[in-house]
Image (cartoon, rainbow, N blue to C red):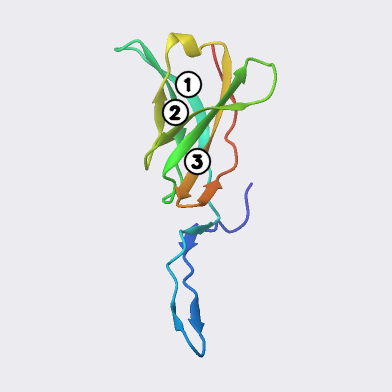
Amino acid sequence: MFVGVLVESWAYKIRPYKAGANESGYSDWSPFIIYNFRAPDSLRIVHDEPSGKDFLMWDNHSKFQNGIRLLRRPKGNGFFETYKEIAGTNLEGYQLNESEKGYEYMLQGFYQEKYIEQYTADTNIVVYE
């Protein structure tokens, strides 16, 4: 049983102001800095019977995510490495193909703007066989 408070994620920007004898004014706004960047979860493989295609699917929980990083490794062997980064908001699926079988997959959501990169925690691991 879970007892606690689910904290909503939120973002903020910073814009410094300098007041000096010879100069004053605002700098440019910073990119978003995200608090409680919620990770995607429930990673799973779904087979679409009518099309015969397989999909990697997940539940997206972040309104700030602007892409996902797909990581994989050979089944039961080695470290996970970045396989693909896919830009887009509200992503919840990726179509798999035959050459991607025999790997374990997990993913992270990400937010990238200018020089800022933030990543969520990893999802669970699934095997595509």
Where is residue 117? Give x, y as percent: 52, 48
Q: Which residue is labeled 2 in the image?
A: 57
Q: Amino acid at mark 2?
A: Met
Q: Nearer the viewer, mark 2 or mark 3?
A: 3
Picture layout, residue 115 above or below residue 11: above
Q: Residue furthest bottom?
A: 21
Nearest to the observer: residue 90 or residue 17: 17
Picture layout, residue 31 above or below residue 118: below
C-alpha gap between disc 1 and disc 2: 6 Å
The total of numbered circles placed on residues is 3
Picture layout, residue 102 above or below residue 28: above
Q: Earlier in the sequence, mark 1 or mark 2?
A: 1
> How crowded is the residue under tag 3: few (<14 C-alpha within 10 Å), some, or many (20+)?
many
Q: Residue furthest front?
A: 22
Where is residue 43? Give x, y as percent: 51, 30
Q: Nearer the viewer, mark 3 or mark 1?
A: 3
> How crowded is the residue under tag 2: few (<14 C-alpha within 10 Å), some, or many (20+)?
some
Q: Earlier in the sequence, mark 2 or mark 3?
A: 2
The residue located at (44%, 46%) in the rendering is 65
Relative side of 26 to 75, left or right: left
Which element type, helix, strand or loop, lies under badge 1? strand
Q: Which residue is labeled 1 in the image?
A: 45
